[in-house]
Amino acid sequence: MLWVDKYKPKSFIDLVGNDNVNRTVYQWVKNWDKCVFGTGRNAFKSAISSSNETKSKNTFQTRKIIDGSLPDQNDKWGRPIKKILLISGPPGVGKTTIANIAALHARYKTIEINASDDRTASKIKSQIMSIASAQSITEKEAPKLLIIDEIDGVSSSKSGDEVNN
């Protein structure tokens, strides 16, 4: 077994770095609970709101997040208004790791797409559409959370497809 697999973080307690960012990612995932599971958010929000940790050097750049909490803005179906979470930072700081751990703790099954494998928007779009349309054989399968890694390398294809399609 490789050391990178043996010692990889498996829970929030194993994570190092900015706890504020880790909590914010988890809170964003938990904001989907009402829509996905039919339940409200758990007590995690109060834990985030009461946290007054000193902000050290940030591993990730967070914008519009002052106290570590996200706005409670949901649409009429209980989904967050901001439907995409973009995590940015230098290579190796744990962006994909925090996304995987947040999904695991929120009871989601992660599906990862590495956008550097297929550098065109049309190929990425077809992968996303096939994942979105895939039906579970068993009803008890966890809902899916899609992680698109290295999305910054995607460009529009030569056929004129746009990323926004």
Image (tube, rainbow, N blue to C red):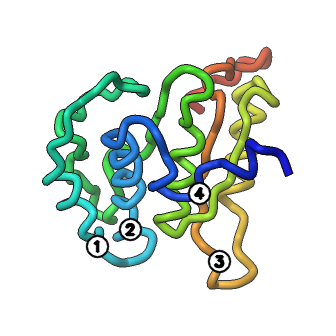
**Residue occupying image coordinates x 68% and y 18%:** 155
Q: Give the spatial CA distance, label 1 vs label 2.
A: 6 Å
**Which residue type does callout 2 highlight?**
Asp
Look at mark 3 in the image and give the residue it sits on: 141
Q: Nearer the viewer, mark 4 or mark 3?
A: 4
Image spot of residue 57 (x, y percent):
33, 22
**Which residue type does callout 4 highlight?**
Lys
Mark 4 lies on a secondary structure that is: loop
| Viewport quadrant of the C terminus | top right
Q: Give the spatial CA distance, label 4 vs label 2.
A: 22 Å
Query: What is the crowding at mark 3: few (fewer than 14 residues within 10 Å), some, or many (at least 20)?
Result: few
Q: Nearer the viewer, mark 1 or mark 4?
A: 4
Q: Which of the two residues, 48 or 82, is positioned nearer the viewer here?
A: 48
**Residue occupying image coordinates x 71% and y 84%:** 138
Q: Give the spatial CA distance, label 1 vs label 3.
A: 20 Å
Q: Give the spatial CA distance, label 3 vs label 2.
A: 15 Å
Q: Give the spatial CA distance, label 1 vs label 4.
A: 25 Å
Q: Give the spatial CA distance, label 4 vs label 3.
A: 21 Å
Tell me if 24 is positioned left or right of 67 in this view.
right
Marked residue nearer the N-terminal end (4 or 3): 4
Tell me if 141 is positioned left or right of 53 in this view.
right
* Residue 10, numbered circle: 4
Tell me if 85 is positioned left or right of 128 in this view.
left
Mark 3 lies on a secondary structure that is: loop
Toward which corner of the image does residue 90 lie, by quadrant? top right
**Which residue type does callout 1 highlight?**
Gly
Marked residue nearer the N-terminal end (4 or 2): 4
Image spot of residue 34 (x, y percent):
34, 70
Toward which corner of the image does residue 113 lie, by quadrant? top right
Marked residue nearer the N-terminal end (1 or 4): 4
Mark 2 lies on a secondary structure that is: helix
Look at mark 1 in the image and give the residue it sits on: 40
